[in-house]
Every structure is written in C-alpha cells, then in structure tokens.
Image (tube, rainbow, N blue to C red):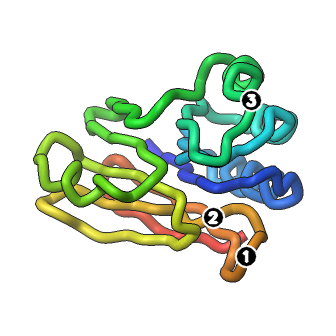
Amino acid sequence: MLLGVMSDTHDDMESIKKAVDFFNSKKAQMVLHAGDLVSPFTFEALNLLEADFAGIFGNNDGDRVLLNQKSGGRLHIQPHILELDGKRLVLVHEPRVVEELAASGKFDAVIYGHLHRHDIRKCNGALILSPGKVARLHKGESTVALLDTGTMEAGIFRL
C-alpha cells in the first residue's frame, strides 16, 4: 500500500492543494496527517484527495469539533494507532515519545510532525518518519512523504 504522509499544513491552502495533487498523481491509497491542520476550511482542499484519509490533532488546531466534522470524523486525538496492510503504525504530533514508541517493538512505523523538519530513520526495527511541513511558514522547504507499506521504505518529496 502506498501511503501519503503530511503534517503541519497550517492553513496554507496553496501548499495543501499541491500536496493533494502530488498524492493524487502518485495514486496514494491512504493519506495520513500528523497534525496542525489549524482551521476547518483546509478540508476544502483535503476532501479532493482520491485516497482514504486519517489524521490527528496537533497543538495549533483550533475548533476541533468543526475540524472533525469537516473531516467526516477522520481526525483523532494522539496517539492514533492504525493497522494498514498488515503493518501497525502509530501517529503522534509532538516528538517527545517517538523513540520510546519505536523501541517498544509494538509498531512497524512511528509517524510524527511538529518540528517542521523531515526525518527518516530506524529504531529497534521500526521506521521513524516525519514528513516535514507542508506550510511555507518559517524557514525550510514544503515537503511530504510517501511510505510503501510493502517494503517499509519511505521518501521525502519537495512540493
């Protein structure tokens, strides 16, 4: 299964649309969002995904009730545990427990956001993945990730 992974969109509609177009062009089957969507109107673009979607709330997300309503109930509090393609994944926003989750041996992948930096590494056999940030705020590039659950290989892609 090809997973699209994004985080920290922070209402940047132009970049969100680029991410949606990228995931649609790659035929991602599922897109995960590691938090900080911020406003419910972001789903005007996110609902154009041709893939399933799941995400978590981040520290900057405002109206969680309306965000979850606009998402169709697909946003969750962290940690959010998913099983996809026989792989067990956990989605968190802040990185404070990433290493512990990976070292637990309970997950094939630990996906996080918040730091606005991409990260791909292994810990105790688990993949640790941060897609970076979609939003063009602060310094750095707008990036997303693709994860192949068959090989558990991931790559970072600039928007």
**How many C-alpha atoms fall within 10 Å of the one at disc 1: few (<14), some, or many (≥20)?**
few
Q: Which residue is mark 2?
A: 133
Residue 94 drawn at (x, y percent)? 45, 53
As helix, strand or loop, the secondary structure at mark 2 comes to loop
| 136 relative to 109, above or below | below
What's the distance in space between the residues labelled 3 and 2, CA to CA? 21 Å
Nearest the eye: 49 or 62:
62
**How many C-alpha atoms fall within 10 Å of the one at disc 2: few (<14), some, or many (≥20)?**
many
Nearest the eye: 12 or 32:
12
Q: For residue 153, which quarter of the picture?
A: bottom left
In primary-sequence order, the first of circles 2 and 1 is 2
Q: For residue 18, which quarter of the picture?
A: bottom right
Question: Which quadrant, please, contains the N terminus?
Answer: top left
Classify residue 49 as left or right of residue 132.
right
Question: Which quadrant, please, contains the C terminus?
Answer: bottom right
Q: Which residue is mark 3?
A: 63
C-beta proximity under 8 Å, tags 2 and 1: yes
Classify residue 85 as left or right of residue 159.
left
Q: Which residue is mark 1?
A: 138
C-beta proximity under 8 Å, tags 3 and 1: no
Name which residue type carries label 2. Lys
Residue 130 drawn at (x, y percent)? 46, 62
Residue 13 drawn at (x, y percent)? 86, 52
In primary-sequence order, the first of circles 3 and 1 is 3
